[in-house]
Image (cartoon, rainbow, N blue to C red):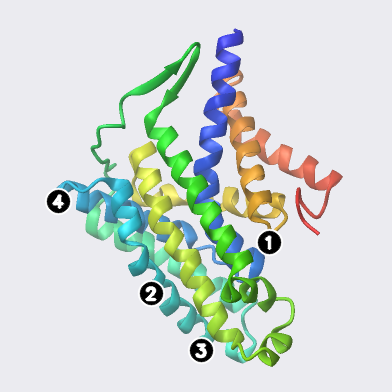
Amino acid sequence: MFGLFINAIVAGILLGGFYAAVSVGITIAFGMLDIANIAQPAFILLGCYAAYMLNLYVGLDPIVTGIIMTPVFFVLGMLVYQLYYHAFEKRGDQAIQGLAFFFGLLFVGEVSLVLVFGVDYRFVEASYIGPSLHLGIVELPLRMLLPFVFSLVMIGLLQLYLTRSFVGRAILAVSQDGQALQLMAASPTRIKEIAVGISIATCSVAGSFLIIIQPVEPSIGRDYIGRIFAICVLGGMTSMPGMLIAAILLGVVESLTSTFYGPSWAPAVSFGFLLVTLAVRPAGLLGR
């Protein structure tokens, strides 16, 4: 029983690292910019299928694909923001209409993937998907361990960029005081364009992680909509370290629940944990 408990906690920590990779983009878009991009899972699925195609036809490693495709997703994100800005934000309609815009993107993305790939589950092949490391009684599946490690690296680099560069600090400031940002010779629109580009660029990496962890089909992204917003809010909206802690906590809670009570209970218990935590600390774990 003790070994089962320890392995459940370790599995939850590894799962939390993956959740962090999935949620980091929404922390930037929603937490820092107030842009409720509920289409984020669709871009993650696009990252999954990009990794699948290059793995199938070129034999490229999925994680390598996720990394080399980030510039493409960055440009895609900038184009999405430009469309969003000119259609809604520029006219002050970014609330309900903007939300409908991203919902439409989610729907169009899912339907497009169904038309191209069908509804069959797709998977990738890599040498690390099957094996595990064994440290005493602890089992570390490489298909979970590698996404966890790369997720920490990605989040660490983004945290450095946001806190040490001018553009990064401007991203943190743009939703708080756009006029002050203009006085510093920075365009709020341009800063938001870059930020949304970064948020969607992370989907390329997160998508490669997802298809390593499990086979995917176009509707699987719906399972993550609630989780990514919950992790963003629980972490404190704008805090990368808070988001990471929240993701790991949620992963551990889900893993323990699935192990001892069954997978069907995991979502209910994890969101119950979220509500209790926010009741005690409404600003989130590291919110101000």
Q: Residue at x 24, y 53 (%)?
A: 117
Indicate the quadrant where residue 173 lies: bottom right
Label 2 environment density (alpha carbons within 10 Å; few <14, some 14–19, many ≥20): some
Question: Up-down: is 170 above or below 53?
Answer: below
The crowding category of the residue bearing disc 3, from other C-alpha atoms within 10 Å (few below 14, some 14 to 19, many at least 20), is few
The answer to whether residue 271 is left or right of residue 212 is right
Mark 3 or mark 4, which is nearer to you? 4
3 or 4: tag closer to the N-terminus:
4
Label 1: few (<14), some (14–19) or many (≥20) C-alpha neighbours in 10 Å: many
Label 1 sits on residue: 238
| Mark sitting earlier along the chain (4/1) | 4
Residue 5, image quadrant:
top right
Mark 2 vs 3, N-terminal side: 2
The kind of secondary structure element at disc 1 is loop
Q: Check disc 4 and report the residue beneath it.
A: 58
Residue type, mark 2 in image: Val
Residue topped by disc 2: 75
Q: Find residue 194 and report its horizontal and vertical position in percent.
A: 50, 76
Label 4's element? loop
Q: Is residue 157 positioned above or below 198 on the image?
A: above
The local secondary structure at tag 2 comes to helix
- Toward the right, the furthest residue is 280
Residue 241 in sight from this viewpoint: yes
Please name whichever residue, 87 or 198, is drawn nearer the observer in this view of the structure: 198
How far, Cα to Cα, is label 4 from label 1?
38 Å
Q: Closer to the N terminus: mark 1 or mark 3? A: 3
Q: Position of residue 119 (x, y in %)?
A: 29, 48
Q: Does the residue at mark 4 contact the one at mark 1 (Cβ under 8 Å)?
A: no
In space, the residues marked 2 and 4 are separated at their CA atoms by: 23 Å
User: Where is mark 3, residue-wise?
Assistant: 86
